[in-house]
Amino acid sequence: MSEVFITRRVFPEAKDRLKEAGIEFEINDTGEVLDKSELIGNLEGKEVLIPLLNDEVDAEVLDAGDELKIVANLGVGYDNIDVEAATERGIMVTNTPGVLTETTADLSFGLLLAAARRIPEADRFVRKGEWDGWELIQPQQGVDVHGKTLGIVGMGRIGTAVARRGRLGFDMDVLYYSRTRKEDVEEELGARYVELDELLEESDFVSLHTPLTEETEGMISESEFSTMKEDAILVNVARGPVVDEEALIKALESGEIRGAGLDVFEKEPEVHPGLKELTESVVLAPHIGSASRETRLKIAEIGVENAIAGLRGERPPNLVNPEVL
């Protein structure tokens, strides 16, 4: 019987590594997300579950895997897994930290630039054959990025990497709000720690990099948008529920803020229809923050190595809940 179940297709290199280790596995190779009943139906006799971030692994799923030893999540975040329930059942949970920092920071800054300079609109304009030559006042006038103020909400690895791009690449002033002060970042980049309200009031660009917790869910809503500058642009590559999408749409439609660059959404893969209708200075991406081939392959490889270590009775390199040992 197979020891491992993988909920979605992965790179051949990851499957080859399992084969090299002599580990049998089954995989949902369709690319389609399994519903809970389908996921549960594939767990009989499995010692390892390798899910993606949009696979909900709650207590019911964990109970169905009565032989589960490890849940090796393919991603840095693991809010899709009930870690407390896993710990109570003696099940190890792992993630893949560090590998996607620079790749996600690239995408974050790309969304910022695309929204500020209205690049997707300009692309559609050219493709439709509507461009009839250069003029001083062109339809896709945006706003400058260089020399502006960048506000980072959540100065972890990715937030720091985005701040570094802004400060060193675009001569931006950096403000940040985070759970803890980051004196090394302050020294390196001249970043200034402020409370959230002050960050929102002063920033031309606000980039979100917080984990999804009870405290951060809906943390950017009506009050926060009313505090932001009218020319401000919001970027979210963190988690969709950090932003109240109804409030965001209202803020964009009313001109409370200028624009947004979003890689994550409240109810993925659903996208609020109101967001789809907004095209001016609004850029939407299908959760591709880490989607370079190099990075996604590394995520798969790290996830598989975590699984192999757990099956061998070793401590996985990226154990989230060490108290189970």
Image: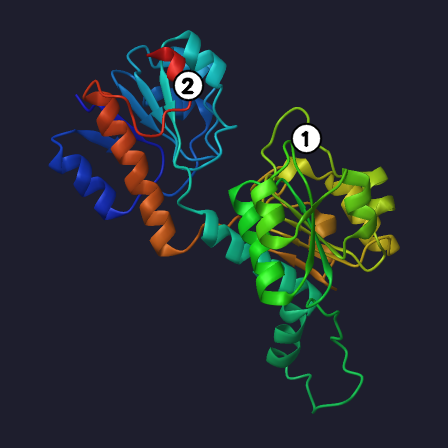
Say whether residue 28 is visible: no
The structure's colour scheme is rainbow
Discs 2/1, front: 2
The Cα–Cα distance between marks 2 and 1, rounded to whole angstroms, is 23 Å
Amino acid type of the residue that numbered disc 1 sits on in the rendered structure: Glu
Is disc 2 placed on a helix, strand or loop? Answer: loop
* In the image, farthest residue toward the bottom: 133
Amino acid type of the residue that numbered disc 2 sits on in the rendered structure: Asn
Identify which residue, 152 or 232, lies in the foreground.
152
Identify which residue, 276 or 50, lies in the foreground.
50
Which numbered disc covers residue 321? 2
The percent position of residue 33, horizontal first and vertical second, equals 44, 36
The percent position of residue 76, horizontal first and vertical second, equals 45, 36
Q: Is residue 315 left or right of residue 320?
A: left
The percent position of residue 132, horizontal first and vertical second, equals 70, 90
Is the residue 72 above or below the residue 223 in the image? above
Query: Badge 2: how crowded within 10 Å, few (<14), some, or many (20+)?
Result: some
Quadrant where the N terminus lies?
top left
When asked about the image quadrant of residue 231, the answer is bottom right
Is disc 1 placed on a helix, strand or loop? Answer: loop
Q: Identify the residue position indicated by label 1 in the image.
A: 217
The percent position of residue 89, horizontal first and vertical second, equals 39, 8
Q: Which comes sooner in the sequence, label 2 or label 1?
A: 1
How many labels were placed on the picture? 2
Q: Are marks 2 and 1 in contact (CB under 8 Å)?
A: no
* In the image, farthest residue toward the front: 187
When asked about the image quadrant of residue 320, the answer is top left
| Residue depicted at x 69% and y 83% | 130
| Residue depicted at x 25% and y 22% | 310
